[in-house]
Amino acid sequence: MKKILFIISGSISAYKSLDLLKDLIKDKFDINVILTKSGQKFLTPLSLSSLINKEIHTDIFSKKESVDHMKHINLTRNSDLIVVCPASANIIAKLSNGYADDLASTTLAASNKKIFIIPAMNKKMWENPANKKNIKDLKLRGIKIIGPIKGSLACGEIGFGRMEDIKIIKKEIKNFFILKKNIKGKKILITAGPTIEAIDPVRYLSNFSSGKQGYEIANCAYTYGAETILITGPTNIEAPEVNKIIKVESAEQMFNESMNICKKYGSIDIAFLTAAVSDWKINKTEKKYKKNENIFKQIKFTENKDILHMISNLRKSRPKIVCGFAAETSSLINNARKKLINKNCDFIFANKISKKFNPMGNDFNEISVIGKNNQKKWRKMTKKKIAEKIIQEVSLYLN
């Protein structure tokens, strides 16, 4: 059963949510509803209760408190998706800033599920700098914003603020559950972050990778129900919640752990090898090099094993789909296409590094997708959104 927690806040567009609820119930979705205090100025708990044939939740402290004393936790844990429709400027501000002063905001603050926000408000409220900042913050956190659209508003003005069309909202909800069905239970391996190659006890060779894109892919895969294994080099960001996380430092350690996972599981569905692995390792010394020593005559570079090539060419334990990543400063598509062929992988997700835009360490990315039979370019967007698009793209090729 596909479970949705519906939150209806105070907006004149609240009545439109009734049509959406009717359609979802007709399509066999299991619906729970939270109606905020201001939402009750537009809809009554009785009208909603008769529609979904369930109790409508309005207060964090209910008559059933002795039984359901953690309503804000239970409502989100027992849902697959949370949809705030309509979302007023007030509830958007609460979610963005972590306010938890009623059942709706407390539930959102405690949520570990995907959240869809459907804004509906006056055009000046939508354009308000504070609201724009809140929306930007929510997008960076991976919360999906659907709408608003431009049109006639209840106040008689015309502009952006009108709630998105019900058909579009319904399509987005259905797409979420299609992706969840495709990904749920699949075994997904992600490598992320940089590797470091020690020169001596105090110095090392590395790169500028932050691990953000790999972490976002891992987070997205886990959110959609995949059995997610993350192998990560050293990063300064918080690791996402996954089924298994393995921390490494060197390219050799990442290679060994990646091969072990492929052989141990034997049936990895997708491997996203996003890590920026050092191409070379150095003959490390246990004694620190001194300035007056001719360090360049003593250091010797040795090529590291090619993790993407090795995994793509495994015979018995090759993942069903292997995805590589490429960062280039020139000839992006040609170099990515060569990498796809030479490594024998299924996809290359390539980004260009320039003075104008460098995705390394950035919250945004701009990706070109290179497949064996297709090629496309995605506009610049948050790495969270890129991660979801990558999962969507690759999941289409799973059996």
Image: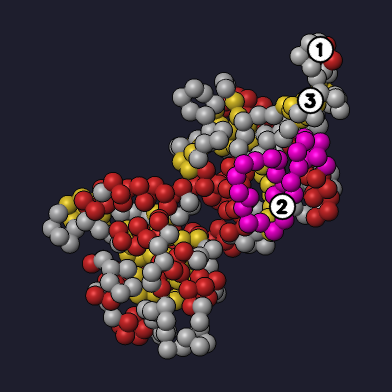
Q: Which residues are magenta?
A: 229-256
- In three-dimensional space, the C-alpha distance between marks 3 and 1, rounded to whole angstroms, equals 14 Å
Q: Disc 1 or 2, which lies upstream in sequence?
A: 2
Within 10 Å of disc 3 (Cα), the crowding (few <14, some 14-19, many 20+) is many
Counting labels gives 3
Residue 242 colored magenta? yes
- Name the amino acid, label 2: Ile
Q: Disc 3 or 2, which lies upstream in sequence?
A: 3
Q: Position of residue 156 (x, y in %)?
A: 13, 58
Quarter the C terminus occupies: bottom right
x 58%, y 42%: residue: 212
Q: Position of residue 226 (x, y in %)?
A: 65, 59
- In three-dimensional space, the C-alpha distance between marks 3 and 2, rounded to whole angstroms, equals 26 Å
- In three-dimensional space, the C-alpha distance between marks 1 and 2, rounded to whole angstroms, equals 40 Å
Q: Which residue is mark 2?
A: 245
Helix, strand, or loop for circle 2?
Answer: strand
Q: Position of residue 172 (x, y in %)?
A: 44, 58
x 52%, y 73%: residue: 73
**In front here: 165 or 281?**
281
Foreground tag (3 vs 2):
3
- Name the amino acid, label 1: Glu
Q: Which residue is mark 3?
A: 199
- Is 55 rendered above or below residue 341? below
**In front here: 386 or 174?**
386
